[in-house]
C-alpha cells in the first residue's frame, strides 16, 4: 500500500465540500443548519469545508441566526431567478456578516451578459447546464472571467443521475474550453455505488476528482468515463495517493468542488479509505 503526499491531499481536498444542508435529501431546518456549519468551520476538518449554500428565498431566515461578530462564507442559490438574485446583491451590500463568494443559477439564456456585468466584485457565478445542453450552452461561458459551469450529478429520481459517459463528456468539455466547474447532488460518498434503498447508481466524489484529473491532463472522454465507473474504493484510494501536488493543483483548477447536504459522510468515507487519517487545522 502506497503512502499519499500530505501536500497533494491538502490541495486536492481544500474547501472541496460546499455545505448544502438545507437542500434535499437532507432538508435540514435553517435553525439547525447554521449552527452545524459554524461548528464544522471551527472543527478539525474545517480545511475541507467550503461555503454555506442558501437559496435567495431563505435569506430572511438566515440573517437572524448570525451574531454581529460572525462571518459566514455564502454561496447564494438563485431559486428566484435573475431578478431575485440581483435584488439579493443589493440586500447583502451592507451586511458584513454574510460574505458573498459565489452564486449558482440555471443558465439564464440571453441574460447571461447582464448577470456577468452585475456580479459584485470577486463573486463567482456557477451556471448550471444540463448534459443535454452542454454542446450548445457550455461555449457561452468560455473566456468569461469568474463564470463557471455547474453540473447536477444526482437528485430524487433515477433520471437525475447522468451516466458516467455524460459526466465524462462534461468534464472533458470544460477542460477543452478552460472552464472551471462544480457539481451538485448525489455526491455524499467517495466511491461510486448503488443506493440500497432507491436502487439509484450514485457517482462518487473521488471518482469525479480522478476523472477531472484525467480530463485536465488531456484524456479522452472514454478514459474519464472508465474512472467514473470504478466502484473499488481501495483502487480509487491508491490512485489518489499516487497524485502529485502538480496533479492535484491542475485537477482543482478544473473541478472546484461540490455541494453535499452532509459534511460528515464525506469525512467518514475519506477516513475509512485512509485518505484523511488526522484532523486538519485552519
Image (tube, grey):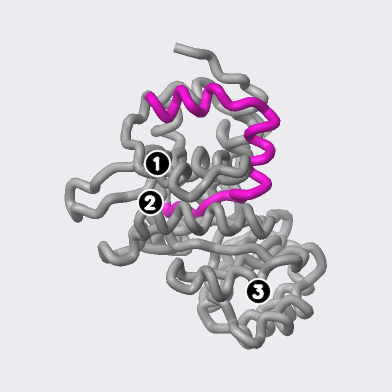
- Quadrant including the N terminus: top left
Magenta stretch: give its range: 235-261
- Of label 1 and label 2, which has the lower sequence position? 2
Q: What number is the disc on residue 140?
A: 3
Q: In the rendered view, does 177 fall on the left or right side of 152?
A: right
- Of label 3 and label 2, which has the lower sequence position? 3
Q: Residue at x 54, y 47 (%)?
A: 17
Q: In the rendered view, does 262 fall on the left or right side of 276?
A: left
Q: Residue at x 52, y 47 (%)?
A: 220
Residue 249, placed above or below residue 25: above
- Taking the view exactly as shown, the residue that stands out farthest to the top is 1
Which residue corresponds to mark 1? 226
Q: Secondary structure at mark 1?
A: helix
- Of label 1 and label 3, which has the lower sequence position? 3
Spatial CA span between label 1 and label 3: 28 Å
Whether 248 is among the magenta residues is yes
- Residues under numbered marks 3 and 2 in contact, where contact means CB atoms less than 8 Å apart: no
Spatial CA span between label 3 and label 2: 24 Å
Residue 37, placed above or below residue 179: above
- Residues under numbered marks 1 and 2 in contact, where contact means CB atoms less than 8 Å apart: yes
Q: What number is the disc on residue 164?
A: 2
Magenta segment, prevailing SS (helix, strand or loop): helix
Residue 264 shows up from this direction: no
- Quadrant including the C terminus: top right
- Nearer to us in this view, 51 or 199: 199
Q: In the rendered view, does 60 fall on the left or right side of 90?
A: left
Give the x, y percent position of residue 219: 55, 43
Amino acid at each position: 500500500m502506497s503512502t499519499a503526499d500530505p501536500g497533494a491531499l491538502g490541495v486536492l481536498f481544500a474547501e472541496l465540500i460546499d455545505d448544502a444542508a438545507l437542500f434535499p435529501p437532507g432538508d435540514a431546518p435553517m435553525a439547525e443548519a447554521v449552527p452545524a456549519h459554524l461548528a464544522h468551520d471551527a472543527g478539525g476538518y474545517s480545511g475541507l469545508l467550503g461555503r454555506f449554500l442558501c437559496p435567495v428565498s431563505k435569506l430572511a431566515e438566515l440573517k437572524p441566526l448570525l451574531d454581529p461578530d460572525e462571518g459566514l462564507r455564502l454561496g447564494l442559490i438563485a431559486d428566484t431567478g435573475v431578478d431575485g438574485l440581483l435584488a439579493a446583491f443589493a440586500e447583502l451590500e451592507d451586511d458584513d456578516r454574510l460574505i458573498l463568494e459565489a452564486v449558482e443559477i440555471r443558465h439564464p439564456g440571453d441574460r447571461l451578459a447582464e448577470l456577468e456585468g452585475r456580479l459584485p466584485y470577486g463573486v463567482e457565478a456557477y451556471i448550471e447546464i444540463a448534459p443535454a445542453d452542454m454542446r450548445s450552452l457550455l461555449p457561452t461561458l468560455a473566456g468569461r472571467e469568474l463564470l463557471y459551469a455547474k453540473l447536477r450529478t444526482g437528485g430524487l429520481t433515477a433520471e437525475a443521475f447522468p451516466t458516467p459517459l455524460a459526466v465524462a463528456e462534461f468534464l472533458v468539455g470544460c477542460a477543452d474550453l478552460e472552464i472551471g466547474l462544480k457539481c451538485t447532488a448525489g455526491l455524499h460518498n467517495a466511491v461510486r455505488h448503488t443506493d440500497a434503498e432507491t436502487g439509484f447508481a450514485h457517482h462518487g466524489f473521488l471518482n469525479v476528482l480522478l476523472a477531472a484529473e484525467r480530463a485536465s491532463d488531456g484524456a479522452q472522454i472514454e478514459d474519464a468515463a472508465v474512472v467514473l465507473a470504478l466502484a473499488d474504493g481501495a483502487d480509487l484510494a491508491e490512485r489518489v495517493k499516487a497524485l502529485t501536488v502538480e496533479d492535484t493543483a491542475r485537477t482543482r483548477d478544473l473541478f472546484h468542488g461540490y455541494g453535499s447536504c452532509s459534511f460528515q459522510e464525506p469525512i467518514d468515507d475519506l477516513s475509512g479509505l485512509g485518505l484523511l487519517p488526522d484532523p486538519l487545522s485552519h
